[in-house]
Image (cartoon, grey):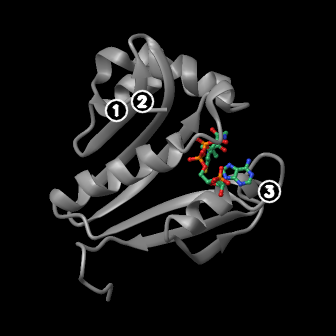
């Protein structure tokens, strides 16, 4: 699939919320997403064909660190590299803004996402016991961003 990743604004919150609802059991509303996007340091990215939103990511950064708030691909578009593409695009953009470290949380019971993050270079640094409604632990992962040719601290 060849569509580009682009940054999207709070005006797209309804489309992002629709995609989020196709991907998560407890989706975020358009109002939630718009509120987040109006906060300083919040970045939303999407792969889309017009109004057909296929993948999304949201980050929030402060100083030189950022958190991946959500990452999702429409069930009809999975295993085509879209999540990897959106994640890599976001990391590159954050690095250009001076972010050096990205954090995220993932359920221990989300093997697909765990493989994706491992492949993308994220390492487990902590575990939050019984963090999710289903009782699953959250794994806290981090990645040090680096420009080509440099080594992480
Ligand atoms: C997790 C999710 C974002 C992956 O999106 P995707 O666009 O299908 O991911 P990609 O195609 O970029 O996958 C890249 C690699 O990650 C791994 N991967 C992704 N999904 C996987 C799965 N279900 N099972 C095993 N490995 C998986 C594979 O190594 C894959 O490469 P491959 O297809 O060549 O084997 C998507 O399944 C999703 O939206 N899930 C529901 C929401 C969610 O759990 N988000 C993450 C919350 S932390």
Mark 3, other Cα within 10 Å: few <14 / some 14–19 / many ≥20? some
Q: Please report whichever mark, 3 or 2, sits nearer to the chain's N-terminal start.
A: 2
Q: Name the spot of residue 66 as percent of width and height, x first.
A: 34, 59
Q: Which mark is residue 93?
A: none
Q: Name the spot of residue 151 as percent of width and height, x first.
A: 30, 86
* Residue designated by label 3: 109
Residue drawn at x 62%, y 29% as measured from the top left: 77
Can you see residue 27?
no
Q: In this image, 121 relative to 26: left or right?
A: left
Label 2 SS = strand
* Residue designated by label 1: 4
In front: 139, or 54? 54
Q: For disc 2, does the CB lie below 8 Å from ligand 1?
A: no
Q: Please report whichever mark, 1 or 3, sits nearer to the chain's N-terminal start.
A: 1
Picture quarter containing residue 79? top right
Numbered disc in front, either 2 or 1 = 1
- Quote the CA–CA distance across marks 3 and 2: 26 Å
**In the rendered image of this protein, does residue 78 appear above or below residue 64?**
above
Q: In this image, 22 relative to 103: left or right?
A: right
Residue drawn at x 63%, y 23% as measured from the top left: 21
Label 3 SS = loop
Mark 2, other Cα within 10 Å: few <14 / some 14–19 / many ≥20? many
Q: Name the spot of residue 35 as percent of width and height, x first.
A: 36, 27
Q: Name the spot of residue 150 as percent of width and height, x first.
A: 24, 83
Residue drawn at x 27%, y 70% as measured from the top left: 100
Q: In this image, 69 relative to 77: left or right?
A: left
Can you see residue 137?
yes
- Quote the CA–CA distance across marks 2 and 1: 6 Å
Quadrant in the picture for the C terminus:
bottom left
* Residue designated by label 2: 47
Residue drawn at x 67%, y 25% as measured from the top left: 76
Q: Do the numbered discs 3 and 2 sit on residues whose CB atoms are within 8 Å?
A: no
């Amino acid at each position: 699939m060849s569509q580009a990743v682009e940054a999207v604004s709070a005006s797209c919150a309804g489309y992002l919320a629709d995609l989020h609802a196709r991907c998560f059991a407890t989706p975020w509303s358009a109002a939630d997403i718009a509120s987040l996007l109006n906060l300083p340091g919040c970045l939303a990215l999407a792969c889309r064909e017009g109004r057909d939103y296929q993948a999304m990511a949201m980050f929030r950064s402060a100083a030189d660190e950022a958190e991946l708030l959500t990452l999702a691909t429409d069930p009809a578009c999975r295993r085509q590299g879209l999540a990897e593409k959106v994640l890599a695009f976001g990391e590159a953009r954050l690095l250009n803004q001076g972010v050096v470290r990205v954090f995220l949380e993932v359920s221990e019971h989300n093997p697909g996402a765990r493989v994706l993050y491992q492949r993308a270079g994220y390492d487990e640094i902590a575990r939050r016991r019984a963090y999710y409604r289903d009782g699953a632990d959250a794994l806290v992962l981090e990645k040090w961003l680096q420009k080509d040719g440099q080594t992480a601290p």
